[in-house]
Amino acid sequence: MTPPNREPSNSGPASTVNLWLAIGDETGEFKDPQSSGFHGVGLILARPATLVAALNEKLDGRTIRSRMDSPVVGLENWLRQAPGKADELGRHHVREAWLFLRDERKLKGEYPLEATHREPVMANLLAAFRWLAGHPGILSLGIHGSGKEVMGDFATGSDRMAVLGTLYGRILALVRPFLGASPRIRMLPGRRSEEIDDASIRRAGQHVPALSAGTTRQTTSKTGGNRTLLDAMERQFWETLTSMGDQWPVPVIPSARQVAFAGYMDREALATALEREHQQGASLVRGEESRLYNLADLACSLMAASCDSARRDLRIRFPDPVGANVRFFSVSEVMA
Protein backbone atom coordinates (compact mmCIF):
# COMPACT_ATOMS: atom_id res chain seq x y z
CA MET A 1 0.00 0.00 0.00
CA THR A 2 1.42 3.37 -0.96
CA PRO A 3 1.34 6.30 1.47
CA PRO A 4 -1.89 8.28 0.97
CA ASN A 5 -1.78 11.59 -0.78
CA ARG A 6 -1.66 14.74 1.32
CA GLU A 7 -5.08 16.35 1.75
CA PRO A 8 -5.67 19.26 -0.64
CA SER A 9 -5.04 22.67 0.90
CA ASN A 10 -8.56 23.93 0.15
CA SER A 11 -10.22 21.54 2.59
CA GLY A 12 -11.25 24.32 4.96
CA PRO A 13 -10.32 25.24 8.53
CA ALA A 14 -10.59 21.64 9.77
CA SER A 15 -7.81 20.41 7.45
CA THR A 16 -5.36 20.24 10.37
CA VAL A 17 -7.35 17.25 11.67
CA ASN A 18 -6.12 14.01 10.11
CA LEU A 19 -9.63 12.64 9.63
CA TRP A 20 -10.47 9.53 7.60
CA LEU A 21 -13.93 8.37 6.60
CA ALA A 22 -14.57 4.65 6.14
CA ILE A 23 -17.73 3.45 4.40
CA GLY A 24 -18.44 -0.27 4.44
CA ASP A 25 -20.37 -2.98 2.63
CA GLU A 26 -20.47 -6.78 2.77
CA THR A 27 -20.83 -9.76 0.48
CA GLY A 28 -22.23 -13.17 1.43
CA GLU A 29 -25.22 -14.21 3.50
CA PHE A 30 -23.43 -14.83 6.83
CA LYS A 31 -25.97 -17.49 7.79
CA ASP A 32 -24.22 -20.87 7.64
CA PRO A 33 -20.99 -21.16 9.70
CA GLN A 34 -20.04 -24.18 7.58
CA SER A 35 -20.61 -22.50 4.22
CA SER A 36 -17.87 -22.74 1.61
CA GLY A 37 -19.26 -19.69 -0.20
CA PHE A 38 -17.45 -16.35 -0.47
CA HIS A 39 -18.01 -14.00 2.49
CA GLY A 40 -16.36 -10.74 3.40
CA VAL A 41 -16.50 -7.05 4.10
CA GLY A 42 -15.14 -4.31 1.87
CA LEU A 43 -14.77 -0.60 2.44
CA ILE A 44 -13.42 2.63 1.09
CA LEU A 45 -11.20 4.76 3.31
CA ALA A 46 -10.23 8.32 2.43
CA ARG A 47 -10.01 11.86 3.69
CA PRO A 48 -13.19 13.92 3.19
CA ALA A 49 -11.55 16.32 0.72
CA THR A 50 -10.39 13.38 -1.37
CA LEU A 51 -13.91 11.96 -1.54
CA VAL A 52 -15.38 15.33 -2.50
CA ALA A 53 -12.88 15.68 -5.32
CA ALA A 54 -13.38 12.06 -6.41
CA LEU A 55 -17.13 12.51 -6.83
CA ASN A 56 -16.42 15.44 -9.15
CA GLU A 57 -13.95 13.49 -11.30
CA LYS A 58 -15.06 12.48 -14.78
CA LEU A 59 -14.94 8.99 -16.23
CA ASP A 60 -15.72 8.73 -19.94
CA GLY A 61 -17.50 12.08 -19.90
CA ARG A 62 -19.62 11.51 -16.78
CA THR A 63 -18.84 12.54 -13.23
CA ILE A 64 -18.43 9.81 -10.64
CA ARG A 65 -21.29 11.47 -8.75
CA SER A 66 -23.69 10.98 -11.66
CA ARG A 67 -22.48 7.41 -12.14
CA MET A 68 -23.18 6.61 -8.49
CA ASP A 69 -26.69 8.04 -8.89
CA SER A 70 -27.63 5.53 -11.59
CA PRO A 71 -27.07 1.89 -12.57
CA VAL A 72 -24.00 0.70 -14.40
CA VAL A 73 -24.38 2.32 -17.82
CA GLY A 74 -26.33 0.04 -20.14
CA LEU A 75 -28.54 -1.55 -17.46
CA GLU A 76 -31.37 0.98 -17.41
CA ASN A 77 -33.75 -0.62 -19.91
CA TRP A 78 -33.30 -4.09 -18.42
CA LEU A 79 -34.01 -2.81 -14.90
CA ARG A 80 -37.13 -0.96 -16.05
CA GLN A 81 -38.52 -4.11 -17.62
CA ALA A 82 -37.45 -6.64 -14.95
CA PRO A 83 -39.94 -7.33 -12.13
CA GLY A 84 -38.97 -5.86 -8.78
CA LYS A 85 -35.98 -3.92 -10.08
CA ALA A 86 -37.37 -0.38 -10.03
CA ASP A 87 -35.47 0.56 -6.86
CA GLU A 88 -32.19 -0.24 -8.60
CA LEU A 89 -32.62 2.59 -11.11
CA GLY A 90 -31.35 5.15 -8.61
CA ARG A 91 -28.07 3.55 -7.60
CA HIS A 92 -24.89 1.98 -8.91
CA HIS A 93 -25.22 -1.63 -7.72
CA VAL A 94 -22.64 -4.00 -9.21
CA ARG A 95 -24.66 -7.12 -8.38
CA GLU A 96 -27.27 -6.14 -10.95
CA ALA A 97 -24.59 -5.85 -13.62
CA TRP A 98 -23.33 -9.37 -12.83
CA LEU A 99 -26.87 -10.76 -13.00
CA PHE A 100 -27.48 -9.08 -16.34
CA LEU A 101 -24.21 -10.25 -17.88
CA ARG A 102 -24.66 -13.80 -16.62
CA ASP A 103 -28.39 -14.37 -17.13
CA GLU A 104 -29.29 -12.01 -19.96
CA ARG A 105 -26.11 -11.86 -22.03
CA LYS A 106 -24.89 -15.37 -21.09
CA LEU A 107 -21.30 -14.15 -20.90
CA LYS A 108 -18.72 -16.68 -19.75
CA GLY A 109 -14.98 -16.91 -19.64
CA GLU A 110 -12.26 -14.57 -18.45
CA TYR A 111 -11.76 -10.92 -19.40
CA PRO A 112 -8.73 -8.81 -18.45
CA LEU A 113 -9.39 -5.70 -16.39
CA GLU A 114 -7.86 -3.49 -19.09
CA ALA A 115 -10.08 -4.92 -21.83
CA THR A 116 -12.39 -2.76 -23.95
CA HIS A 117 -15.52 -4.87 -24.28
CA ARG A 118 -18.20 -4.40 -26.93
CA GLU A 119 -20.95 -5.15 -24.39
CA PRO A 120 -21.70 -1.71 -22.84
CA VAL A 121 -22.45 -3.03 -19.35
CA MET A 122 -19.20 -4.99 -19.20
CA ALA A 123 -17.24 -2.07 -20.63
CA ASN A 124 -18.64 0.35 -18.05
CA LEU A 125 -18.18 -2.11 -15.18
CA LEU A 126 -14.53 -2.62 -16.12
CA ALA A 127 -14.05 1.15 -16.40
CA ALA A 128 -15.48 1.69 -12.90
CA PHE A 129 -13.24 -1.03 -11.46
CA ARG A 130 -10.18 0.49 -13.15
CA TRP A 131 -11.03 3.94 -11.82
CA LEU A 132 -11.36 2.80 -8.21
CA ALA A 133 -8.40 0.41 -8.30
CA GLY A 134 -6.17 3.17 -9.67
CA HIS A 135 -7.35 6.04 -7.48
CA PRO A 136 -4.38 7.56 -5.62
CA GLY A 137 -6.35 8.85 -2.63
CA ILE A 138 -9.02 6.23 -1.95
CA LEU A 139 -8.01 3.04 -0.17
CA SER A 140 -10.08 -0.01 -1.16
CA LEU A 141 -9.84 -2.55 1.64
CA GLY A 142 -11.42 -5.83 2.66
CA ILE A 143 -11.25 -9.18 4.41
CA HIS A 144 -12.69 -12.30 2.80
CA GLY A 145 -12.99 -16.05 3.24
CA SER A 146 -15.49 -18.87 3.30
CA GLY A 147 -18.38 -18.85 5.74
CA LYS A 148 -16.50 -21.38 7.84
CA GLU A 149 -13.41 -19.20 7.92
CA VAL A 150 -15.08 -15.92 8.83
CA MET A 151 -17.67 -17.31 11.25
CA GLY A 152 -15.82 -20.33 12.61
CA ASP A 153 -12.05 -20.23 12.34
CA PHE A 154 -11.94 -16.48 13.00
CA ALA A 155 -13.91 -17.11 16.22
CA THR A 156 -16.57 -14.49 15.59
CA GLY A 157 -19.55 -16.78 16.19
CA SER A 158 -22.84 -17.02 14.37
CA ASP A 159 -24.20 -13.54 15.13
CA ARG A 160 -24.02 -11.87 11.72
CA MET A 161 -23.70 -8.36 13.09
CA ALA A 162 -20.87 -9.35 15.45
CA VAL A 163 -19.09 -11.04 12.55
CA LEU A 164 -19.33 -7.91 10.41
CA GLY A 165 -18.14 -5.69 13.24
CA THR A 166 -15.17 -7.92 13.99
CA LEU A 167 -14.06 -7.96 10.36
CA TYR A 168 -14.39 -4.18 10.03
CA GLY A 169 -12.44 -3.62 13.25
CA ARG A 170 -9.59 -5.88 12.18
CA ILE A 171 -9.09 -4.37 8.73
CA LEU A 172 -9.16 -0.78 10.03
CA ALA A 173 -6.65 -1.58 12.77
CA LEU A 174 -4.30 -3.20 10.25
CA VAL A 175 -4.16 -0.08 8.07
CA ARG A 176 -4.15 2.49 10.86
CA PRO A 177 -0.30 2.65 10.99
CA PHE A 178 -0.29 3.85 7.37
CA LEU A 179 -2.61 6.83 7.89
CA GLY A 180 -0.14 9.41 9.13
CA ALA A 181 0.18 11.10 12.50
CA SER A 182 -2.72 10.89 14.97
CA PRO A 183 -5.36 9.70 12.51
CA ARG A 184 -9.01 9.89 13.43
CA ILE A 185 -11.12 7.18 11.80
CA ARG A 186 -14.90 7.50 11.51
CA MET A 187 -16.64 4.36 10.26
CA LEU A 188 -20.12 4.15 8.72
CA PRO A 189 -21.16 0.54 8.03
CA GLY A 190 -24.63 1.78 7.14
CA ARG A 191 -28.18 0.70 7.82
CA ARG A 192 -28.95 -3.00 7.88
CA SER A 193 -31.90 -5.33 8.26
CA GLU A 194 -32.03 -8.96 9.33
CA GLU A 195 -34.36 -11.91 9.65
CA ILE A 196 -36.43 -11.88 12.82
CA ASP A 197 -34.94 -15.20 13.96
CA ASP A 198 -31.33 -14.10 13.58
CA ALA A 199 -28.90 -14.69 16.43
CA SER A 200 -28.65 -11.03 17.38
CA ILE A 201 -32.41 -10.81 17.88
CA ARG A 202 -32.55 -13.94 19.99
CA ARG A 203 -29.55 -12.73 21.99
CA ALA A 204 -30.98 -9.26 22.48
CA GLY A 205 -33.72 -10.65 24.69
CA GLN A 206 -35.97 -7.73 23.87
CA HIS A 207 -39.29 -7.13 22.20
CA VAL A 208 -38.83 -6.75 18.45
CA PRO A 209 -41.40 -4.37 16.90
CA ALA A 210 -43.96 -5.94 14.59
CA LEU A 211 -42.92 -6.26 10.98
CA SER A 212 -44.67 -4.75 8.00
CA ALA A 213 -46.94 -7.08 6.07
CA GLY A 214 -45.11 -9.23 3.56
CA THR A 215 -41.65 -9.01 5.12
CA THR A 216 -39.67 -11.19 7.51
CA ARG A 217 -36.92 -8.65 8.14
CA GLN A 218 -36.50 -5.84 10.64
CA THR A 219 -34.01 -2.99 10.74
CA THR A 220 -31.05 -3.64 12.99
CA SER A 221 -31.71 -0.39 14.85
CA LYS A 222 -34.75 -2.17 16.34
CA THR A 223 -33.17 -5.55 17.05
CA GLY A 224 -30.04 -4.69 19.00
CA GLY A 225 -27.93 -5.49 15.95
CA ASN A 226 -26.46 -2.01 15.56
CA ARG A 227 -24.98 -1.99 19.03
CA THR A 228 -23.67 -5.52 18.52
CA LEU A 229 -21.81 -4.52 15.34
CA LEU A 230 -20.32 -1.35 16.80
CA ASP A 231 -19.24 -3.04 20.05
CA ALA A 232 -17.57 -5.89 18.16
CA MET A 233 -15.88 -3.48 15.74
CA GLU A 234 -14.44 -1.21 18.41
CA ARG A 235 -13.35 -4.13 20.59
CA GLN A 236 -11.55 -5.83 17.68
CA PHE A 237 -9.92 -2.57 16.56
CA TRP A 238 -8.30 -1.96 19.93
CA GLU A 239 -7.46 -5.62 20.56
CA THR A 240 -5.65 -5.75 17.22
CA LEU A 241 -3.64 -2.61 17.96
CA THR A 242 -2.77 -3.97 21.40
CA SER A 243 -1.45 -7.15 19.79
CA MET A 244 0.97 -5.05 17.71
CA GLY A 245 2.93 -4.10 20.82
CA ASP A 246 3.88 -0.81 22.45
CA GLN A 247 4.35 0.97 19.12
CA TRP A 248 0.61 1.68 18.96
CA PRO A 249 -0.48 2.29 22.57
CA VAL A 250 -4.19 2.18 23.31
CA PRO A 251 -5.54 5.30 25.04
CA VAL A 252 -6.57 4.56 28.61
CA ILE A 253 -9.42 7.07 28.74
CA PRO A 254 -12.57 6.01 26.81
CA SER A 255 -13.11 9.53 25.45
CA ALA A 256 -9.61 9.50 23.95
CA ARG A 257 -10.36 6.18 22.27
CA GLN A 258 -13.52 7.69 20.80
CA VAL A 259 -11.47 10.54 19.32
CA ALA A 260 -9.14 8.08 17.61
CA PHE A 261 -11.77 5.63 16.37
CA ALA A 262 -15.56 5.63 16.38
CA GLY A 263 -18.28 3.88 14.43
CA TYR A 264 -21.80 5.02 13.63
CA MET A 265 -24.78 3.24 12.11
CA ASP A 266 -26.70 6.43 11.38
CA ARG A 267 -25.79 9.20 8.95
CA GLU A 268 -27.13 12.01 11.10
CA ALA A 269 -25.35 10.80 14.23
CA LEU A 270 -22.05 10.71 12.33
CA ALA A 271 -22.63 14.10 10.70
CA THR A 272 -23.50 15.70 14.04
CA ALA A 273 -20.34 14.30 15.61
CA LEU A 274 -18.25 15.50 12.66
CA GLU A 275 -19.53 19.07 13.01
CA ARG A 276 -17.35 19.39 16.09
CA GLU A 277 -14.14 18.43 14.30
CA HIS A 278 -14.46 18.55 10.51
CA GLN A 279 -17.23 20.57 8.86
CA GLN A 280 -16.40 19.36 5.36
CA GLY A 281 -16.73 15.77 6.55
CA ALA A 282 -20.12 16.51 8.09
CA SER A 283 -21.39 18.13 4.89
CA LEU A 284 -20.07 15.24 2.81
CA VAL A 285 -21.85 12.60 4.90
CA ARG A 286 -25.13 14.53 4.88
CA GLY A 287 -25.12 15.35 1.20
CA GLU A 288 -23.46 12.34 -0.40
CA GLU A 289 -24.42 9.37 1.80
CA SER A 290 -25.98 7.22 -0.91
CA ARG A 291 -23.09 7.87 -3.32
CA LEU A 292 -20.56 6.91 -0.67
CA TYR A 293 -22.41 3.66 -0.05
CA ASN A 294 -22.35 2.95 -3.78
CA LEU A 295 -18.59 3.51 -3.83
CA ALA A 296 -18.30 1.04 -0.95
CA ASP A 297 -20.38 -1.43 -2.98
CA LEU A 298 -17.93 -0.95 -5.85
CA ALA A 299 -14.98 -1.69 -3.54
CA CYS A 300 -16.66 -4.78 -2.08
CA SER A 301 -17.52 -5.97 -5.59
CA LEU A 302 -13.92 -5.38 -6.67
CA MET A 303 -12.85 -7.66 -3.83
CA ALA A 304 -15.31 -10.38 -4.80
CA ALA A 305 -14.41 -10.18 -8.48
CA SER A 306 -10.66 -10.31 -7.87
CA CYS A 307 -10.56 -12.82 -4.99
CA ASP A 308 -13.37 -15.24 -5.86
CA SER A 309 -12.82 -15.59 -9.60
CA ALA A 310 -12.18 -19.35 -9.53
CA ARG A 311 -15.81 -20.01 -8.62
CA ARG A 312 -17.28 -17.87 -11.38
CA ASP A 313 -18.25 -18.75 -14.94
CA LEU A 314 -17.69 -15.08 -15.76
CA ARG A 315 -14.33 -13.87 -14.51
CA ILE A 316 -12.18 -10.76 -14.67
CA ARG A 317 -8.41 -11.17 -14.75
CA PHE A 318 -6.80 -8.63 -12.46
CA PRO A 319 -3.17 -7.57 -12.25
CA ASP A 320 -1.24 -8.44 -9.09
CA PRO A 321 -1.42 -6.23 -7.15
CA VAL A 322 -4.82 -4.94 -8.23
CA GLY A 323 -3.79 -1.38 -7.39
CA ALA A 324 -1.35 0.52 -5.19
CA ASN A 325 -4.09 1.47 -2.71
CA VAL A 326 -6.04 -1.80 -2.91
CA ARG A 327 -5.57 -4.43 -0.21
CA PHE A 328 -7.86 -7.42 0.23
CA PHE A 329 -6.79 -9.81 3.00
CA SER A 330 -7.82 -13.43 3.23
CA VAL A 331 -9.03 -14.42 6.68
CA SER A 332 -6.10 -16.83 7.00
CA GLU A 333 -3.72 -13.85 6.69
CA VAL A 334 -5.23 -11.91 9.58
CA MET A 335 -6.23 -14.61 12.07
CA ALA A 336 -2.92 -14.64 13.92
Image: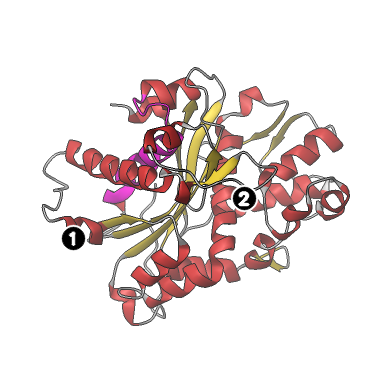
Q: CA distance from mark 1 to mark 2?
A: 40 Å
Q: Name the residue located 39 percent from the left edge and 63 percent from the top edge.
A: 5
Q: Which amino acid does the dot numbered 2 rest on?
A: Arg
Tag 2, which secondary structure?
Answer: helix
Position of residue 236 relative to residue 156, above or below, is: below
Tag 1, which secondary structure?
Answer: helix
Q: Can you give x and y, in whole percent of width and height, for residue 294 in the image? A: 60, 55
Q: Is residue 162 visible?
A: yes
Q: Which residue is under mark 1?
A: 255
Q: Which residue is under mark 2?
A: 130
Q: Can you give x and y, in whole percent of width and height, for residue 255 in the image? A: 18, 60
Quadrant in which the C terminus is drawn: top left
Q: Quadrant of residue 137?
A: bottom left
Q: Quadrant of residue 38?
A: top right
Q: Name the residue located 41 percent from the left edge and 28 percent from the top edge.
A: 331
- Front-most of 53 and 198? 198
Q: Label 2 crowding class (10 Å Cα cut-off): few <14, some 14-19, many 20+? A: some
293 left or right of 265 in image: right
Start-end of magenta stretch: 154-177
Position of residue 142 relative to residue 54, above or below, is: above
In the rendered structure, which disc, 1 or 2, sits on the residue that comes first in sequence? Answer: 2
Q: Which amino acid does the dot numbered 1 rest on?
A: Ser
Is residue 165 rendered magenta in the image?
yes
Q: Name the residue located 45 percent from the left edge and 67 percent from the top edge.
A: 268
